[in-house]
Image: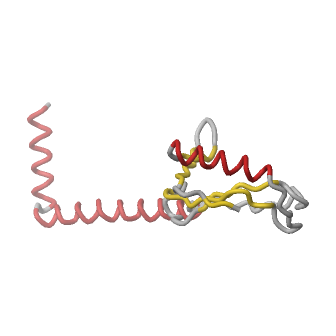
Amino acid sequence: MAELSSPLKLFAYVGRENGLMVVGSREAMAELSGQLSAALVSQEPVSAEWPHELVSASVEVGPYIDSKFWRVSFHTEGSVASERKALVARSAPSGWLSLATLALAVVGGVSLVRWVWNAFQLVVPADRLRRMLSANVGRHS
């Protein structure tokens, strides 16, 4: 297994297409290409439990803001069954958490509006407010 000398950057993108982009300098990509080619030529033993690692690299910028430490590695298929995959869910809040946050935001907004309304009524009593509003309505009609 070889390690790249310069770190790469990973970017996940979602939209019309979903994917993971590996970005690096020209030198890093040339080094990666050379190491992959050299590793494919060599005949190292393949483990039955895990695919043989050809090249790995540290990642300077990961694809998600809430997950800092990433590595990228390239492996060849060995005797490991292709069904054995480690699928990891994206680390994003669940729908229920988003819904609960929205409900709390609505309750907070309503409370803030009621608080401002009550504070305004303390400054301007209700009967005076009615007279002001009726005087303004009479002027504009």
Relative image position of residue 86 (x, y in whole percent)? 76, 62
Taking the spot 59% from the left edge, 44% from the top edge, the residue there is: 30
* Residue under the image location 13 percent in, 54 percent down: 129
When the figure is inspected, residue 92 is found, relative to residue 41, above or below; the finding is below
Q: Quadrant of the C terminus?
A: top left
Q: Nearer the viewer, residue 18 or 140?
A: 18
Picture mark count? 0
Image coordinates for residue 135, horizontal then vertical, percent: 9, 43
30 left or right of 75 in image: left
Say whether residue 64 is visible: no
> Residue 29 sits in which quadrant?
top right
Q: Position of residue 18 (x, y in %)?
A: 63, 43
Kindly give the residue lying farthest to the top in the view shown. Answer: 141
Residue 56 occupies which quadrant of the picture? Answer: bottom right
Q: Is residue 44 left or right of residue 20?
A: right
In this rendering, position of residue 54 left or right of residue 14: right
Question: Quadrant of the image for the N terminus?
Answer: bottom right
Of residues 64 and 133, the one drawn nearer to the viewer in this rendering: 64
Residue at 10 percent across and 49 percent down: it is 132
